[in-house]
């Protein structure tokens, strides 16, 4: 169990990653209230402002799904099924409640299954709209105010604007630290491996934001201090997809002779590219950021201008990362049954290729059992990049 | 290159009603009308059934091309594989919605050729003037499909309108939020009309819209009353036919043709009831189709159930309406506001009922209501692997039904809506046989 003294640097991140939820469990024993959530579209600022410790519910690629199938169909996204399975098995028994955003069908359409089966004291679905137009933004603000009221009732006290603003500032610090961390990946070779970054990102999802910020800061200092210790490798890879919350796939790439230096993932760059603007009514800034500035396949960005401009609007952040991080090739890593990202594949692929960067598209399940068969695809892709 | 293959010849499903037997010709005429509109330069809109704004499309004389319908037709004619393969070759995963894959496969092929793909079912799917998504609460492909199609038709504008409804929650009552849901829907519908006026060049005729809204209200009522006739024993029409009569209900809503169709069906069912004429001569088991879209290529499975003495007097699938007079709608003069209230009140129709039964849920109440009113002996569902709209939650619904109501025999069939490669007739029928045995055993114990 990581104690306060140990909660620093890469070793601590590794421990939090390996024993995911250990800190939340300990905090629960100390009387803290833990609110589980799924997906990067839940405004964690609001949970923190209400006095809860947000805890991101995730699955476990090493754990076979054995219980979930009795309640949830196998046609649901394997990540969601796995997360539900480990939840049923008691991995997150410390949760006081759960919040879900209307991110995709696999979440929205299984919300009732989660709610009724886990039987938590609190649950709430933020019925987030898909469009980014002004009408949808106003509707979303109304939804967030309903959520705020509901959460206040459960918390037993009002969520003040001041506490929301403080939470916004804390999470903006978190995003700023992650941006700083990612700067370390721009070096050749990178100063920090993709595997180390992923472990840190996942560890941070399980911690109170203040602790997460300290941990990220300590990792940045450690990595800067250790300097360039990573070996040169033949290729710099970017991974693009939905949620990758384990190192299995990242390790596969890095064990095959490349560094993962950039991503368009959750957790990852999709979550920290843009801050929440501090606004008079904090809900305004929160709504704007979560609806319009999280570049997720589930959000329908309203098209203005030509189709090429539309692609740039939707995927420009990927193009920027390719340039900024010196990416040699992109791996489009999509889970089976993922409608929001699955439908984007031809567009993302052609967009990245139009930048002169080769793309490997892989469909996978959220399981270690499938990782092995991807090895030859990765190796062949790296050979292709090497031959260019 | 996708190979042209000849679809398998199939025997037509035997219908119980004369009305349902007319559906094939009606559907074909509908597709033909879309193609004619395209040729004549009339506006064609890709749209989704149950979009919540059929009335706007009709009042503006826009010809809807229901893309799910065309994919379903390809599936029913067992001619979807070449379009699915085409989409797969474009890097769309086969695990995505196969309606969408079939449609995208077809459209990308048509765009590449500059003409219809070879031997397209019923003449093919017309190139649209606009594409109208309807994202919220039904499924992701309702906006992702058309967004993805822009890759092949970048010149065709897309509009996505959220038509949300309040989720069933413990932490607040839907009445606390319904006003802002309605406000959002109304604002979105106005925005949609502005989009259509801009891209179609036709102004909305508001008087006509009011008339069309009134017509669709009356059609909702008529359909509800007509389907209620199926409570009769013996049952005069079952789900097999309802999977046909969903065509006028969903693809022709807000038209006089739909209203007339259900008037005819109502008359026919009343005649059958008076003559004690049932779907099967010796009705042994009354089943409910309790969820899931059907396998369009295997509708003859309903005949197979019938051959065992089983009928389906009711289904939750494609019965996405209630009598309007039961919805407790506020009186409003704005037709858009009426549409919004009808949408929200329909979606929340069983919320109060669910609160009265501990552990219940509106979907469970829906099942219980039909079990009791239609004297149901067993529940059949279908899990289509590619569809995450109506299919996640079916297992849970059955589990919850058992907890809050009691045991009732159930069967979940597994296949797909369009992708025939997921279907095994022998296995499906073996499972139906086993289910019939269970029903018989339960009935015997009850005697």
Image: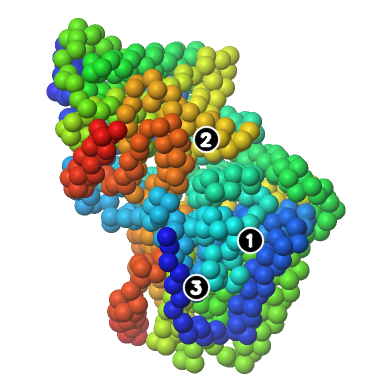
Q: Earlier in the sequence, mark 1 or mark 3?
A: 3
- Residue B199 lies left or right of residue A310; in this view the side is right
Residue annotated with mark 1: B126
The residue at which mark 3 appears reads as: B76
Viewer-proximal residue, A349 or B57? A349
Q: Position of residue B336 (x, y in %)?
A: 74, 47
Q: Pick whichever, B90 or B189, lies toward us.
A: B90
Tag 3 secondary structure: helix
As displayed, is residue A305 above or below residue A366?
above
How far apart marks 2 and 1 lie (CA) works out to 25 Å
**Mark 1 element type:** loop
- Chain letter of mark 1 equals B
Q: Is residue A38 above or below residue B389?
A: above
Q: What residue is shown with label 2?
A: A311
Q: Quadrant of the N terminus of chain B?
A: bottom left
What residue sits 40% from the left and 32% below the top? A356
The answer to the question of whether label 2 and label 3 lie on touching residues, with beta carbons closer than 8 A, is no
Badge 3: chain ID: B
Query: Could you say where residue A1 lies in the image, as x and y percent from the top left?
Result: 14, 23
**Residue at x 63%, y 45% (from the top left corner):** B155
Q: Chain of mark 2?
A: A
Seen at 60% across and 77% down, the residue is B24
Left or right relative to B386: residue A366? left
Separation (CA) of disc 2 from disc 3: 35 Å
- Asked if badges 2 and 3 are on one and the same chain, I answer no
Judged by depth in the image, the label closer to the viewer, 2 or 3, is: 2
Q: Nearer the viewer, residue B258 or B424?
A: B424
């Amino acid at each position: 169990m990581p104690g306060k003294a140990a909660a620093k640097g890469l070793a601590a991140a590794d421990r939090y990653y390996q024993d995911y939820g250990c800190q939340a469990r300990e905090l629960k024993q100390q009387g803290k209230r833990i609110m589980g959530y799924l997906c990067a579209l839940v405004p964690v600022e609001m949970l923190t402002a209400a006095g809860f410790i947000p805890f991101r519910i995730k699955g476990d690629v090493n754990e076979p799904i054995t219980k979930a199938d009795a309640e949830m169909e196998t046609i649901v996204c394997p990540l969601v099924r796995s997360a539900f399975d480990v939840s049923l098995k008691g991995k997150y028994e410390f949760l006081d409640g759960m919040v879900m955003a209307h991110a995709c069908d696999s979440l929205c359409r299984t919300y009732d299954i989660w709610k009724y089966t886990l039987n938590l004291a609190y649950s709430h679905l933020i019925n987030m709209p898909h469009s980014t137009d002004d009408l949808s933004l106003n509707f979303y603000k109304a939804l967030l105010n309903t959520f705020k009221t509901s959460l206040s009732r459960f918390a037993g006290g009002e969520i003040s604007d001041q506490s929301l603003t403080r939470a916004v500032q804390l999470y903006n610090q978190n995003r700023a630290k992650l941006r700083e961390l990612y700067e370390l990946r721009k070096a050749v070779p990178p100063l920090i491996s993709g595997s180390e970054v992923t472990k840190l990102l996942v560890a941070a999802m399980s911690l109170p934001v203040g602790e997460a910020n300290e941990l990220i800061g300590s990792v940045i200092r450690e990595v800067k201090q250790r300097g360039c210790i990573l070996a040169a490798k033949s290729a710099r890879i970017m991974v693009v997809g939905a949620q990758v919350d384990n190192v299995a796939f990242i390790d596969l790439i890095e064990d095959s002779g490349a560094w993962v230096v950039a991503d368009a993932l959750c957790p990852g760059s999709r979550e920290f590219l843009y801050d929440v603007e501090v606004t008079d009514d904090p809900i305004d800034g929160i709504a704007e950021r979560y609806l319009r500035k999280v570049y997720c396949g589930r959000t329908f960005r309203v098209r203005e201008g030509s189709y090429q401009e539309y692609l740039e609007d939707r995927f420009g952040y990927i193009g920027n990362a390719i340039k900024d991080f010196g990416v040699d090739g992109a791996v489009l890593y999509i889970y089976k049954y993922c409608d929001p990202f699955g439908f984007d594949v031809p567009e993302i692929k052609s967009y990245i290729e139009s930048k002169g960067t080769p793309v490997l598209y892989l469909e996978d399940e959220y399981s270690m059992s499938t990782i092995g068969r991807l090895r030859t695809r990765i190796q062949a892709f790296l050979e292709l990049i090497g031959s260019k | 290159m996708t190979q042209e293959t000849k679809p398998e010849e199939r025997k037509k499903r035997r219908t119980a009603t004369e009305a349902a037997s007319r559906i094939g010709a009606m559907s074909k005429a509908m597709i033909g009308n879309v193609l004619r509109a395209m040729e004549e330069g009339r506006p064609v809109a890709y749209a989704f059934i149950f979009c919540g704004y059929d009335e706007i499309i009709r009042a503006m004389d826009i010809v809807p091309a229901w893309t799910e319908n065309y994919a379903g037709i390809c599936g029913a004619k067992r001619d979807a594989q070449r379009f699915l393969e085409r989409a797969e070759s474009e890097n769309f995963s086969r695990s995505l919605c196969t309606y969408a894959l079939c449609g995208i496969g077809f459209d990308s092929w048509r765009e590449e050729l500059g003409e219809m793909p070879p031997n397209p079912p019923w003449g093919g799917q017309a190139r649209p003037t606009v594409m109208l998504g309807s994202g919220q609460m039904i499924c992701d492909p309702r906006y992702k499909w058309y967004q993805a199609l822009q890759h092949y038709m970048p010149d065709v504008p897309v509009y996505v309108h959220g038509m949300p409804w309040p989720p069933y929650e413990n932490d607040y009552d839907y009445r606390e939020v319904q006003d802002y849901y309605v406000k959002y829907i109304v604002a979105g519908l106005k925005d949609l009309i502005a989009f259509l006026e801009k891209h179609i060049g036709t102004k909305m005729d508001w008087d006509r819209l009011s008339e069309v809204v009134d017509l669709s209200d009356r059609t909702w009522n008529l359909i509800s009353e007509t389907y209620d006739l199926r409570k009769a024993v013996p049952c005069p029409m079952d789900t097999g036919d309802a999977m046909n009569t969903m065509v006028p209900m969903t693809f022709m809503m807000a038209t006089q043709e739909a209203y007339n169709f259900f008037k005819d069906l109502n008359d026919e069912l009343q005649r059958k009831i008076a003559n004690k004429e049932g779907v099967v001569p010796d009705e042994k088991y009354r089943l409910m189709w309790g969820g899931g879209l059907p396998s369009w290529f295997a509708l003859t499975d309903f005949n197979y159930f019938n051959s065992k003495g089983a009928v389906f007097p009711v289904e939750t699938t494609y019965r996405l309406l209630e009598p309007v007079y039961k919805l407790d709608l506020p009186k409003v003069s704005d037709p858009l506001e009426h549409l919004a209230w009808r949408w929200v009140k329909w979606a929340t129709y069983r919320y109060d009922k669910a609160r009265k039964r501990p552990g219940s849920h509106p979907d469970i109440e829906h099942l219980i209501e039909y079990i009791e009113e239609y004297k149901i002996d067993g529940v059949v569902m279908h899990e289509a692997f590619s569809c995450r709209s109506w299919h996640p939650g079916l297992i849970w619904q059955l589990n919850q039904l058992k907890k809050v109501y009691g045991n009732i025999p159930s069967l979940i069939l597994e296949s797909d809506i369009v992708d025939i490669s997921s279907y095994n007739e022998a296995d499906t029928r073996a499972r139906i046989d086993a289910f019939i045995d269970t029903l018989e055993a339960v009935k015997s114990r009850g005697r």
